[in-house]
Image: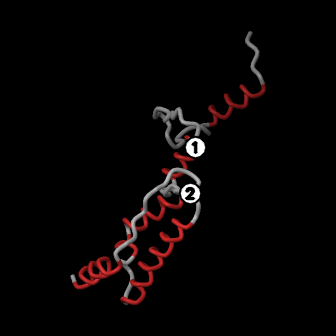
Amino acid sequence: MQYESWIDRQIREAIERGEFDNLPGAGQPLQLDPDEDWWIKAKLKRENLEPVLPGPLMLRREAERIQQTLDDVRDESTARAIVEDLNSRIREHYLRPALGPTVVVRLVDVETELATWRQRRTR
């Protein structure tokens, strides 16, 4: 005769009631990640979130995606204000003391981006 603990009995009874049937990921291998931040990565992926980047890298990403940011902008004065605001924040980044390695973030050419924006709007 084997001893069944209270926990083991609760699990056995739940299995018999079918409470573990049809769980998400049932029958699939576990996605084990040796990184200690595995749960953060899994949450970002599960909820389709973008990771939070340090300031200069976020500015770089904004500069790379400036045309996507301007997609819904209707007038040129607003588009110009958005691009100039980005350049202002890039300048402010260089005025602050660096806390880590220096990350180069180039200013966005306002006129070039506005010309591209104008051209995309006429299509």
Residue 75 placement (x, y as % from top left): 37, 90
Tell me: 70 left or right of 116: right
- Residue drawn where x is 36% and y is 88% of the image: 76
Tell me: 57 left or right of 74: right
Q: Which is nearer the N-term, disc 2 or disc 1? A: 1
Above or below, 100 relative to 76: above
Report the number of numbered marks.
2
Which residue has dot 1 on it? 39
Tell me: 18 left or right of 119: right
Q: Nearer the viewer, residue 104 or 9?
A: 104
What's the residue type where badge 1 is placed?
Trp
Look at the image and tell me in which quarter the N terminus lies: top right
Scheme of colours in the image: secondary structure
Q: CA distance from mark 2 to mark 1?
A: 30 Å
Q: Secondary structure at mark 1?
A: helix
- Residue drawn where x is 48% and y is 57% of the image: 50
Q: Nearer the viewer, residue 26 or 38?
A: 38
Where is residue 21, by image quadrant? top right
What's the residue type where badge 2 is placed?
Ala
